[in-house]
Amino acid sequence: MTVKAESKTYVNYINGEWKSSSTNEVQASINPGNKNEIVGYASKSTKKDLDQAVTSAKKAQIAWRKLSAPARGEYLYKVANVLEARLEEVAETMTREMGKTLQEAKGETARGVAILRYYAGEGMRKVGDVIPSTDSEAFMFTSRVPLGVVGVITPWNFPVAIPIWKVAPALVYGNTVVLKPATETAVTAAKVIECFHEAGMPAGVINMVTGSGAIIGQGIIDHPDINGITFTGSDSVGKRVGQGALARGAKYQLEMGGKNPVIVAEDADLDLAVEATINGGLRSTGQKCTATSRVIIQSSVYNVFKEKLLAKVKEIKVGEGLKSDTWMGPCSSESQLITVLDYIEKGKAEGAVLLYGGSKCEAIGLENGFYVQPTVFENVTSNMTIAQEEIFGPVLALMEVETMEEALTVANDVEFGLSASIFTTNIQKMLSFINEMEAGLVRINAESAGVELQAPFGGMKKSSSLSREQGQAAIEFFTNIKTVFVKG
C-alpha cells in the first residue's frame, strides 16, 4: 500500500489540545477512489480517552453556559470565517476521503459555513415566553437552559455538514460537545475541528475523539456525564443509541434511514422529473439518507419516462471525485460497495428486471477504486428487498402504478418516512400528496434529496426519534424548558 508523503496522523482534540490516544494506535483512512492512497491516519481511541474528553467538556460547560448567547454566537461567526477561508482544502480532503465529487464537497463545505452563521444569529433570538399567572401579583415566564454535555455521533456521508448542524446549535444554546465522527471520514472531521481551534474556541467547549463505534460510540451512550446524544446513522445502531440513552435517562435524538419515493404523475413535466430523479437518486453515489430510491410512475407515462431516464443515466461519467468531468464518484468504502452489489443480486434473484448497470466498474483507471455502475431496475414490487430496505447506493427501482391512489399506497408501504417528492401540475394531486404522504419532508416538483438549513429536518416512522434538526426547531432538543414563577 502506497503512503503519500503528505499523509499524517490526526489525533484527538481534548481540552483545546491535540492529543494522541492513550495507546498511540492509529487507523488509516483510505481514498475510496484509489485504495492505494492513504489520506491520513486517525487515532484508535479508548474509553480512557473518551473519559478525558467528557471531563474536559463538563468542566468547560460551567463557564460556557454563563456567556451570553450572543457572545457564544460570535465564536461561531469566527469559526465560519475560518472554514470559509479553508473551503478548498476541506472540500478536497472530503473528496479524497469519502469519494463524493469535488463540486459536491465544495457545496457541502459552503453549507457548513452557512449553518455556522445561521446559528451564530440564533444567539440573538428569544429563549422563552412570558406567561400570565393567576396570581395578579406574580410574574411567570419560561427560559431555556442547556442540557450540559452533548455527545455527537455522525456518519461518513456528510462529514462536514452533519457534524456542524449538530455542533453549532448545541454550542450556541450553551452546551459543550464531545464529537465522535465516523472513522471513514475522521481526517475531514479533524480539518473541521481545526477551524474551531483556529477561531479561538475556549478549551473544552468542543472535543473530538476518534475510534470505533463499539468503544467510543458505546462509551458515549453509556457515559453518565453525557446529558444528551444526537445521532445520525443506521436504523440498527440508532436503536442501540436510543435504548442506551433511555436506560440512564439521557436525552436522545436519532436520524436514521430512508426509503424515499418519487411519484411521477401522468401530468408531470417528465424532463424535470427525470432530471430530479437522477440528481436525487444518484448524486453522491446514492449515499444520502434522503436519496431517491423508489420511482413510482403512472402507467400512461411509464414507458416515456423510462426511456428518458435511461438515456440520461447512460450519460453519467463515473470516476475519481477530483476530476472535473466526473459526475458520480465511488462508494465510500469496499464494504459499502459489497453491500450495494449484494442488494443488486437480491433484486435480480427476487424477479426485478435489470435495465442498466448492476456491476462493479472495471474500466481502465477505476480498477483500484470502489466504483459501481449507476443501476436501474424495473418490475419492482413492494414486497421485494430492494423496495423495502435502504441500499445507500446508486440504485433506482421503477414501480409502475395505475392511479394516484395506488401511487400513494405504494409510497407509504415501507417502514421509513424521511423524504418524498411528487411531480405533477395538478393542485389536487399536490394537496393529496402533502396530506397523505407519511414523511417528514415532502417536496413538490423537486428532488427528494433537498433540505434547507433554516427549515426543520427529520423523519417519521423508523426514520427518526421524531425530534427535528436544523432551523429554529433545533432548540427543542438542545435545551430544556425552565418555568420561573416570581412573587415579590
Image: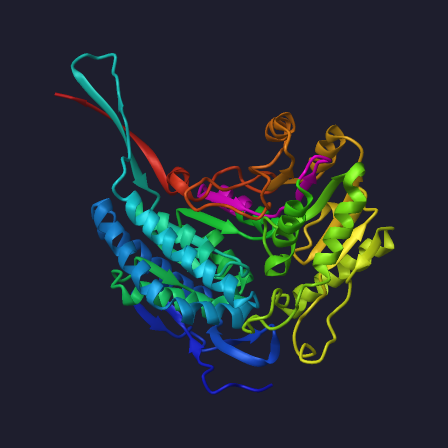
View extreme (left): residue: 488
**What residue lies at 39% left-to-right and 61% top-to-bottom?**
51
**What residue lies at 42% left-to-right and 51% top-to-bottom?**
165
Q: Which of 272 and 333 is in front in this view?
A: 272
Q: In which quarter of the image is residue 30?
A: bottom right
Residue 478 x/y as whole percent: 38, 43
Residue 175 visible in the shown view: no
Left or right, 173 with reference to 8: left
Left or right, 146 with reference to 32: left
**What residue lies at 33% left-to-right and 47% top-to-bottom?**
119
Residue 347 x/y as whole percent: 81, 54
Residue 397 x/y as whole percent: 75, 49
Residue 99 among magenta residues: no
- Position of residue 409 relative to residue 4, above or below, is above
The image quadrant where one finds the C terminus is top left
**What residue lies at 31% left-to-right and 54% top-to-bottom?**
58
Q: Quadrant of residue 484?
A: top left
- Position of residue 275 relative to residue 340, above or below, is above
Residue 158 x/y as whole percent: 51, 58
What's the magenta region? 242-268
Residue 105 visible in the shown view: yes
